Amino acid sequence: MATQIVMDHTGDTRHHFDAKDLKALAEAERRFKALTANGFTAATRQASGDVSLARSFDPNTEETVFYPRLVGG
Amino acid sequence: MVVWLTVPASWIGRAALHLIHAVQAAQSRRRARFESRAVRGITLLREWLSPQQRQQLECFNHIEVIGCDSGKSYRIQHGVCQNVLELDGDGCPRMGWCFIPEGNLVPGDVMLAQKIALETNERRALAVAKQFLVPPLLPHVAATT
């Protein structure tokens, strides 16, 4: 099961999907595009703990976190 | 007015008590919701930390990250604003940077967003950040950090 974690004012919302399920995969891709178009940043992490940005949807990614646009505090 | 005068005082007292209980229950529910959000935020943060950062969080309630562009070290303290400190070569704070994700996020989520931003796109994060001065540490405090 792959997971997309979206940070928002309700905490973090987790969307689990089976990458082998084409319908779920399409929904996950749609969510990825919608969030990044709205200013969210997508990031993934490797087993080593290293983090990298996800510029496009990768169906093989196990876990992706989305955080809202950064602003000066 | 006449109706008001004919209402027994005990009814008013009971209604007031009922209202107080309802407000207390609502406050309690809101507090529980926030605590639940805060715990989830810290749990997510822990999952995304390196083993060394996880240990720092446990021991000092902060994490240290290396900026991907400059190689500088930053300390991200537990909090939601004015919690990112740039460190000098001795590990002492020399400048503060304030940048946060939009929305009312809990500390764990804010800290994770700051960590990812500094480790993957430091320049862009600092471009939106506001700087703040960090008071110099007293010698005996600096020795313990």
Image (spheres, coloured by chain):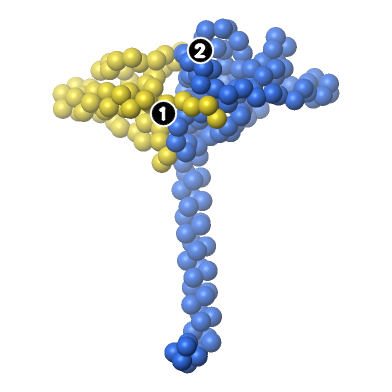
Chain A painted colour: yellow
Chain B painted colour: blue
Residue that numbered label 2 is attached to: B123
In the picture provided, is B61 more to the left or to the right than B123? right
- In the rendered structure, which amino acid carries the disc numbered 1? Pro
| Image location (x, y in percent) of residue A9 | 42, 39
Badge 1 marks a residue whose secondary structure is loop
- Residue in the foreground of this view, choosing between B44 and B10: B10
Which chain contains the residue that carries disc 2?
B
Do badges 2 and 1 share one subunit?
no
- State whether residue B66 appears in this view: yes
| Image location (x, y in percent) of residue B18 | 48, 73
Which chain contains the residue that carries disc 1?
A
The mark found on residue A68 in the picture is 1
Q: Is residue B95 above or below residue B72?
A: below
Please state, as top left, top right, bottom left or bottom right, where the C terminus of chain B lies in the image. top right
The number of discs equals 2
Which residue is rendered at x = 33% and y = 27% of the image? Answer: A38
Which residue is rendered at x = 77% and y = 22% of the image? Answer: B136
Q: Residues within 10 Å of mark 1 (few under 14, many from 20)?
A: many
In the picture provided, is B59 more to the left or to the right than B43? right
- In the rendered structure, which amino acid carries the disc numbered 2? Arg
Which residue is rendered at x = 42% and y = 26% of the image? Answer: A69
- Seen from this angle, which residue lies furthest front? B1
Q: Gap between marks 2 and 1, in whole Å? A: 17 Å
| Image location (x, y in percent) of residue A35 | 31, 27
Q: Is residue B126 above or below residue B40?
A: above
| Image location (x, y in percent) of residue B119 | 50, 14
Q: Residues within 10 Å of mark 2 (few under 14, many from 20)?
A: some
Badge 2 marks a residue whose secondary structure is helix
